[in-house]
Image: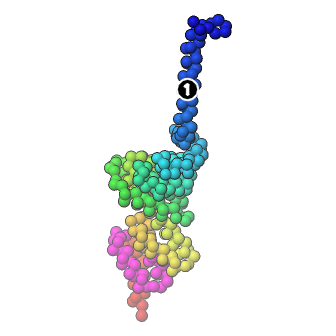
Amino acid sequence: MFQSNSGVPFRRFLPVMLGTTLLLSACSSSKEVVDKDPVQARYNKAMADMEKRDYDNAILKLEGLMFSTRATPLEDKVLHNLASAYFQSRQYLLSAEIYRRLLQQTPDSPYAKDAQYQLARSFEKLSPQFELDQEYTVNAINEFKIYLDQYPAEDTQRVASDVETYRELLKLKPDNAQYKARYEQAMAELSEQSPARYANAAIATLREKLAHNRYSIASQYARLRKYRPAAMYYDQVIANYSDTVWNEPAWIGKIEMAEKRSKWFEARQALEQYLQHFPEKKGKVDATYRRVLRKFSTP
């Protein structure tokens, strides 16, 4: 029997040596796997941050993976999660940029549908108050329309009905805080249940904002006694946003601007068109109509 120098039989060391060898071999093998795919390891760490809602750290990791995963199976996953992290951290301009990049670089990705929807929602989040420039509002409408063209609507009637109800109530009382909260809650629920219906509802709301913007510009010109540009903006509301609550006030503004400019034929024509569209509001323009007709009868 072999013995060690200390006199202990060598066979007693064999299990220990074998176990140590196997452990070192396993560690070496594991290290080789990690070394072979460090990109996947970094992506997994980013996903762990996403699950913890640690979006700042997830963003740092995913930004570092954008170029190393180009034209690989991870490309669309990295872009989709990076855009989502930006969106969740309210960096909507950046989320819009990355969602668009995903659609351009990986148009056949299974994430393309969600990317198109979230691209529209990013611009919707960027849409400012009606008084300000409405570039992002227009972008949101266009992107929602693209989404609707590409993907059919799902049916969630109850929530869609709630959205419509509170939208109409807000038209009557736009400053009602309870209506606003209920509308936003219904829209959030609709977003989760039916993106297509949400898109339709969002387009309607955004169009109201655009109409309000044009109407407010017209009103400002009117207050400055710049009646011609005021009339032009009222015409924009009438021509482009007849489905909004600002259509009827725009007709009134158009009539008033024609009267202010002594354009009696235009005023009479606008009055007659107004009455065709809103016969129930005849009493609102009776005095104006009589005043305009007197101008025609004056020698």
Residue depicted at x 49% and y 46%: 74
Which residues lie in the magenta part? 252-281
Residue depicted at x 32% and y 50%: 155
* The one of 138 and 44 positioned closer to us in this rendering: 44
Residue 91 seen in the figure: yes
Task: Check disc 1 and give the amino acid type.
Answer: Ser
- Category of crowding for the residue at label 1, using alpha-carbon neighbours closer than 10 angstroms: few (below 14), some (14–19), many (at least 20): few
Asked whether residue 292 is drawn in magenta, I would say no
Quadrant in which the N terminus appears: top right
Residue depicted at x 54% and y 59%: 128
Residue found farthest to the right: 6
Residue 124 seen in the figure: no
What secondary structure do most residues of the magenta stretch adopt?
helix
Estimate the x, y position of residue 135 in percent, counting from the top left.
52, 64
Estimate the x, y position of residue 68 in percent, counting from the top left.
55, 49
Choose top left, top right, bottom left or bottom right for residue 31: top right
Asked whether residue 262 is drawn in magenta, I would say yes
State the colouring used for the structure image: rainbow
Q: In this view, does 6 lie to the left or right of 280?
A: right
Please tell me whether residue 235 is drawn above or below residue 83 in the rendered image.
below
Q: In this view, does 195 lie to the left or right of 60?
A: left
Choose top left, top right, bottom left or bottom right for residue 5: top right
Estimate the x, y position of residue 46 in percent, counting from the top left.
55, 41
Which residue in the protein does label 1 denote?
25
Quadrant in which the C terminus appears: bottom left
Q: Is residue 61 left or right of residue 181?
A: right
* The one of 294 and 248 positioned closer to us in this rendering: 248
Secondary structure beneath label 1: helix
* The one of 162 and 112 positioned closer to us in this rendering: 112
Residue found farthest to the front: 1
